[in-house]
Image (spheres, helix red, strand yellow):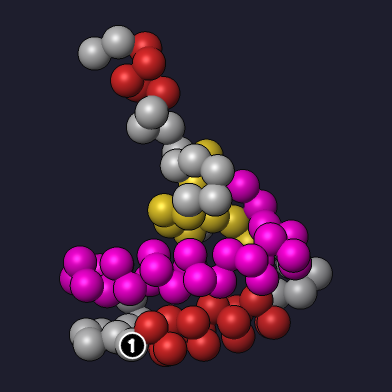
């Protein structure tokens, strides 16, 4: 495997400020849905509606004002996980 192939798989962790957290809500909802559908042990169970995932992350964003959140990105604008 060449160096170029390896860099395509890199995940970058970034802190989200308030504006970035607001903008990330739809992508974070997508991650949550993917995790639940993949049988991840999280607070939610199947079936999970998109409205439920969006509401969770909107509430998180509201509670987290002034505190940083972090998300894993596989490229610009592509959130693939949270920490």
Q: Quadrant of residue 47?
A: bottom left
Q: Is 28 left or right of 31, judged from the image as shown?
A: right
Name of the residue lying farthest toward the top: 2
Q: Position of residue 3 (x, y in %)?
A: 37, 12
Q: Is 20 left or right of 6, judged from the image as shown?
A: right
Q: Position of residue 55 (x, y in %)?
A: 51, 87
Q: Position of residue 14 (x, y in %)?
A: 61, 47
Q: Residue at x 45, y 42 (%)?
A: 74
User: Where 35 falls versus 15 (above or below)?
Assistant: below
Q: Quadrant of residue 33?
A: bottom left
Characterize the local packing of mark 1: few (<14), some (14-19) or many (20 or more) Cα atoms within 10 angstroms. few
Q: Residue at x 69, y 82 (%)?
A: 62
Q: Is residue 26 something that shows in the picture?
A: yes
User: Where 52 falls versus 3 (above or below)?
Assistant: below
User: Where 29 falls versus 63 (above or below)?
Assistant: above
Q: Position of residue 17 (x, y in %)?
A: 74, 60
Q: Main secondary structure of the magenta part?
A: helix
Q: Quadrant of residue 44?
A: bottom left
Instruction: Write down the residue under mark 1.
Output: 49
The region drawn magenta spans: 14-40
User: Where 28 falls versus 79 (above or below)?
Assistant: below
Total marks placed: 1
Q: Residue at x 42, y 32 (%)?
A: 10
Name of the residue lying farthest toward the right: 66
Q: Is residue 29 magenta?
A: yes
**Disc 1 on helix, strand or loop?**
loop
Q: Residue at x 80, y 69 (%)?
A: 66
Q: Is residue 41 something that shows in the picture?
A: no
Q: Quadrant of the N terminus?
A: top left
Q: Is residue 36 magenta?
A: yes
């Amino acid at each position: 495997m060449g160096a170029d192939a390896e860099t395509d798989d890199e995940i970058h962790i970034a802190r989200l400020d308030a504006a970035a957290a607001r903008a990330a809500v739809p992508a974070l909802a997508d991650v949550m849905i993917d995790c639940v559908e993949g049988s991840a042990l999280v607070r939610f169970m199947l079936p999970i509606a998109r409205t439920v995932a969006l509401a969770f992350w909107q509430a998180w964003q509201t509670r987290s004002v002034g505190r940083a959140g972090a998300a894993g990105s596989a490229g610009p604008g592509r959130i693939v996980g949270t920490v």
